[in-house]
Amino acid sequence: MRLADVLSLVEGWYPPHRADDWDRVGLVCGDPDAQVRRILLAVDPVLAVAGEAVALDADLLLVHHPLYLRGTSSVAATTPKGRVVHQLLTHGCALYSAHTNADAPAGGVSEAIAQALGLEEVRPLEADPVEPRDKLVFFVPVADAERVRSAVTEAGAGAIGYYDSASFTSPGEGRFRPLVGANPAIGRVGDLEVVDEVRVEVLVERRVRGRVLAALLAAHPYEEPAYDVVPLAALDDPSRGSGRIGVLAEPMTLRAFAQEAATVFPRTAGGLRVAGDPDAVVRTVALCGGAGDFLLERALAAGADVYVTSDLRHHPASEVRERDDLALVDVAHAAAESLWLPVLRDRLVTALDDTVEVHVSTVNTDPWTFRV
């Protein structure tokens, strides 16, 4: 399978345009027309992981963290990041990153952690708004309807979830009188015309609205097509958002929950850091993959008993503990996010129907090696 086809599949699940503005996701190196027979999944694009990809004879290394988050003017092999690029390209292996665009959606990082912890009734801790959309309504002669409908669909209209080409059509009559100066496609100047037309309704993501309208005007047979653009209400998306919150099948103490969590996350030198009364009862669990102290207030407002995340800073954690009984569990960053890799592997294996091998990295990329 071509690399471009594999990445098209991944980007359907984790759209690059949903990444944060500061993020750098997508194809770092590799030829989109190259063939992919074997994929390695990892959290970090470090030298050891690149070596693992080469040893596996992988054609694609798909990682969570970007290699060049802050940009660069050189990929020379005199730097660690440059050596990663050289090692991969020398052995014909592409590098691709899905970062913040893979955190929030269904099947993403935070949801994978919630599933691994056995949570039920899982929902986003802070739901994302539905991507701004409009309803486009246009009127077109029956004979031209399919051509115009196809043109706006190819421009991006009519996409709903995992479906495209979605539209609704109803019949009617179009009436108009061409005036002096008009160049009508149907009828003559000065004569009232009645034309069998259809009304076509499609959803359009606002980010492609301009492109869709341009396609409509270019394909429509009329000199002055009639169309409406109706902005749709802003709604929360129940399937995607920052973090997750859910409930345990059975309540347990904080001590028991932390011990259970320690068996779920890969072992690291730092282990889990826990703040709270060990005997406090835990039922509602909030979490966020990666550095998640930006959601501490949201976890409090949602009524969580414990918040699981990574890279908690001293002052935010201390302030929360002073104000509330919310317990905290801090897990190593890479260890938490690595729980997404088996989920991604299973999605790829199912979608690719065993035509491509998919492997999960066995390299521990947590930077800490021991504690004293």
Image (cartoon, rainbow, N blue to C red):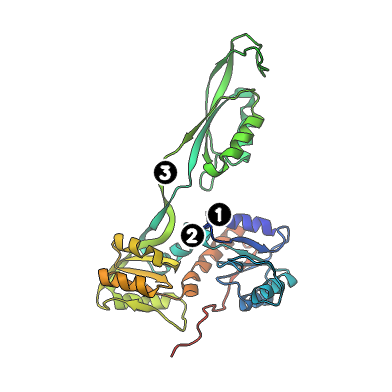
Q: Nearer the viewer, residue 316 or 9?
A: 316
Q: Nearer the viewer, residue 111 or 87?
A: 87
Q: Secondary structure at mark 3?
A: loop
Residue 294 is situated, as x and y percent measured from the top left of the image, at 40, 64
Give the mark nearer the N terminus: 3 vs 2: 2
Q: Residues within 10 Å of mark 3 (few under 14, many from 20)?
A: few
Q: Mark 3 highlights which residue?
A: 234
Q: Residue at x 61, y 36 (%)?
A: 152
| Cα gap from disc 2 to disc 1, whole angstroms | 12 Å
Give the mark nearer the N terminus: 1 vs 3: 1
Label number found at residue 15: 1
Q: How many marks?
A: 3
Q: Residue at x 71, y 75 (%)?
A: 77
Q: Secondary structure at mark 1?
A: loop
Give the farthest residue toward the bottom: 372
Residue 158 is situated, as x and y percent measured from the top left of the image, at 55, 39
Q: Residues within 10 Å of mark 2 (few under 14, many from 20)?
A: some
Q: Mark 2 highlights which residue?
A: 107
User: Which amino acid does the dot numbered 3 rest on?
Assistant: Ala
Report if residue 31 is visible in the image: yes
Is 227 left, or right, of 295 in this rendering? right
Q: Secondary structure at mark 2?
A: loop
| Cα gap from disc 1 to disc 3, whole angstroms | 20 Å
Label number found at residue 332: none
